[in-house]
Image (tube, grey):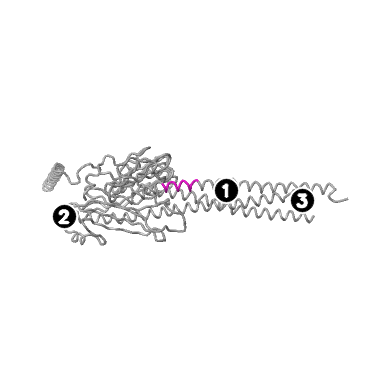
Amino acid sequence: MRLSDTGAGRDTGTGSHVAAVALFAIVILVVLFLVIFGSSVYRSAVAHSAADDSLRATQGYIDTHIQAADAQDAISIGEGPQGSALVISEAGDTATYEVRIYAYEGALVEEYARAGSSYVLANAQRITSCSSFEVSWADEASESHRLLKVTTDAGTTFIALRSDGEVG
Amino acid sequence: MKRGISFYIETVVLIVMIVLASTVLVQLFANSASRSRSAAQLMGATSAARSAAEAFSGTETDETVARTLEGVCLTSDDYLSDVVVAYFNDAGGISTADEAALVAVITSEDELQTSGDLRAAHIRIYDASAFVGASDTYQQVLDRASTVSAAYTLETRSFVPMHRIMFPMGPGPVIPSAEQESAMTDTAGAMLQVASAATITTQGANAS
Amino acid sequence: MKDQPIKTGTLSILIVIAVISLAVLSILAYQTSRADYERSREYADATTVIYQVEAEGESWRASVDEVFFTQNTSTLTDAQLEQMLPDGTTVEDGVVKATFTEPVGSADGTATLTAELARSGSGYEVRTWTVERTGARSGESTYESIL
């Protein structure tokens, strides 16, 4: 007769069986918790990274362009196909050209064209996703406009023009 | 029996390894979450600070900075200093105080010269949650700003020439017209007369 | 085998695979957040430098403005005017010009402010006031910045 055939042996076997199952259940629960927690953290990290990249691409792009082109009468506001457009003029050898920045079909686009020509959407290059883009002068009452007000998905920000035609 | 013991030993080893691995993973995930939040806050704070700096450069006084940023301009009790408090969302766009994720505290200094005013701005961006309930007075704002660490700080300068100090909002000639010059002269003359009369009265009172 | 209470071989393998996958996920999350933070940090540092350069330019403009305000510069030649202006200022063809450069990051990136004031009678107009970033990006991050 084997020891395992006795009641005592069987009871010990059942207890250890339950303990083993419980331990593995705990381990599986811990792994499950880690999977849920980890995937949530990764999703959040990716979302934040995408939002930050979008913000840099939108505001950083506009700020950089304006700062690099701040000259007398170079910055103006035009009318794009779906709202206002930021127009940066540059004098070429034979004609004046414009860089027009505006929102079109959920994206911030840039179009390079001769000054005064109509907007050709097919020529516009996509910069980044941006559902809304509005630009206006913050100091509307002043003749010498010095402060641009830019409103995008992220909200309203300001850009000052240091160049002006006023005599110091 | 031997197999049973070895099974338990293996189980214990497995559990210990799982616990160690979990500890490391949880720390990595927590670190990632924290760093991701910091990156987003820094990005928003930088954007807010840029906006505040541009508003500072595009205007002439602390009051107009506050008005532009839809914030408040608080004055010290001795009326000698101002602080501008403005509110921004988490992406650095203008916001109301109730919905703000970031708060900008802007202090400025003026270096007056004959031809104008060289203004220096000190812009500090804070997490709005750390700045709740401190914005009623000038001193409260400065006290809170000194105890809380800023998410981002930015220093800039702006020169305001004399003609913009005199005629800040335009339109108007940069060089005063004959009428304006005449009006200014009349006003200056009238003020001089009042000052002279006050001096004579004072001297008369002292003599008697 | 009879002494083994449950079949643990398959479960253990599954658990090990899950833990390895979690390790990969954690590394991905860590790298994503770290790269995001680095880009934000560099954007912030570049912003600080750009406004530092702007501040230098404004201080320079204050000095130049003081000269124009206190002197009758309409009678001065470009050379005479240049003598009265801060060091580093050039006056050519009626244009008062100065550049200010500051390094950005630890590599050879720079932020340069170029200010040009056009003489107009006894005063001046701010003709251009441009800030440009040049050179390679800095830091440990290999990501390009829009700035």
The residue most toward the top is A82
Residue A60 image offset from top left, x and y in percent? 39, 49
Q: Helix, strand or loop at disc 3?
A: loop
Is A88 or B107 nearer to us in this picture?
Answer: A88
Q: Residues within 10 Å of mark 1 (few under 14, many from 20)?
A: many
The residue most toward the right is A1
Q: Are marks 1 and 3 in contact (CB under 8 Å)?
A: no
Q: Does the image show residue B72?
A: no
Residue C15 image offset from top left, x and y in percent? 66, 50
Q: Looking at the image, is A41 positioned above or below residue C113?
A: above
Q: Magenta span covers which residues? A: A47-57
Which residue position is annotated with label 2?
Answer: C74
Give a yes or no on whether discs 1 and 3 share a subunit.
no
Give a yes or no on whether discs 2 and 1 share a subunit.
no
The disc label shown at residue A38, or none: 1
Residue B86 image offset from top left, x and y in percent? 37, 44
Which residue position is annotated with label 3?
Answer: C4
Q: Amino acid at mark 2?
A: Ser
Instruction: Tell me, yes or no, whether the highlighted magenta stretch contains residue A52.
Output: yes
Q: Looking at the image, is A104 positioned above or below residue B157?
A: above
